[in-house]
Image (spheres, grey):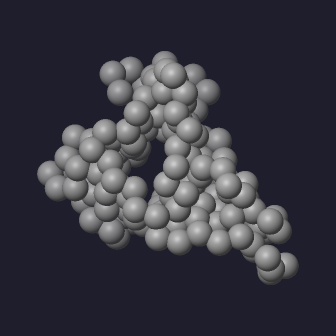
């Protein structure tokens, strides 16, 4: 369980740092979102956190204005997210279900590798996130845009 959580956290950091998204023709684009890459590095150690040698870990600061959104997306290695300011609502498409959670400043959450979600600023001020994307393939984006509305979260 710890290993999976650690892998998820590192994947999320990598996706944020890359700051480059591959957008498919039908993908839902982010709106009112600024991604400021903070750092990126290739794992060269054999430490105790289960990261594959040769993959990247990325970190980013992401700011989304009121009413803005991330667009439907996932992260190849997941993401570890810390909310610095504001509040946001995460809509997760899990099988045929829509899971909805709201997070506020001082809280943290994890997006699992490949988990499809949409994050919307439902607050009254811009939200600021610090995100770590672990386990990002070298040179690849830590973010994967997906087709709009996977159908599990009506109206999102």
Locate the N terminus and report the quarter of the image it occupies.
Answer: bottom right
Identify the residue shown where x is 48% and y is 27%: 27
Total labels drawn? 0
Q: Position of residue 90 (x, y in %)?
A: 41, 43
Question: Is 96 on the left or on the right of 31, as rendered?
Answer: right
The answer to whether residue 19 is seen in the rendering is yes
Where, by quadrant of the figure, is residue 101 drawn?
top left
Identify the residue shown where x is 65% and y is 62%: 134
Q: Position of residue 65 (x, y in %)?
A: 23, 50
Q: Position of residue 61 (x, y in %)?
A: 40, 64
Identify the residue shown where x is 33% and y is 68%: 84
Position of 2 relative to 101 (above/below): below
Identify the residue shown where x is 49% and y is 54%: 19
Furthest-left residue in view? 124
Question: Is 47 on the left or on the right of 136, as rendered?
Answer: right
Position of 146 relative to 39 (above/below): above
Question: Is 41 on the left or on the right of 143, as rendered?
Answer: right
Position of 124 relative to 146 (above/below): below
In this view, the residue in front, 84 or 138, is 138
The answer to whether residue 97 is seen in the rendering is no
Locate the C terminus and report the quarter of the image it occupies.
Answer: top left
Furthest-front residue in view? 139
Q: Position of residue 107 (x, y in %)?
A: 39, 65
Question: Is 129 on the left or on the right of 5, as rendered?
Answer: left
Where, by quadrant of the figure, is residue 149 drawn?
top left
In this view, the residue in front, 25 or 130, is 25
In this view, the residue in front, 35 or 95, is 35
């Amino acid at each position: 369980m710890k290993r999976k959580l650690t892998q998820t956290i590192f994947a999320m950091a990598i996706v944020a740092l890359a700051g480059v998204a591959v957008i498919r023709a039908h993908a839902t684009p982010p709106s009112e979102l600024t991604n400021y890459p903070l750092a990126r590095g290739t794992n060269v150690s054999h430490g105790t956190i289960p990261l594959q040698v040769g993959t990247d870990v990325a970190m980013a600061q992401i700011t989304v204005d009121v009413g803005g959104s991330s667009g439907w997306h996932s992260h190849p290695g997941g993401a570890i997210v810390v909310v610095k300011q504001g509040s946001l609502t995460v809509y997760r498409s899990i099988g045929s279900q829509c899971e909805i959670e709201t997070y506020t400043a001082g809280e943290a959450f994890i997006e699992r590798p490949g988990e499809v979600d949409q994050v919307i600023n439902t607050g009254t001020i811009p939200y600021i996130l610090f995100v770590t994307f672990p386990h990002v393939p070298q040179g690849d984006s830590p973010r994967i845009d997906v087709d709009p509305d996977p159908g599990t979260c009506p109206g999102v």
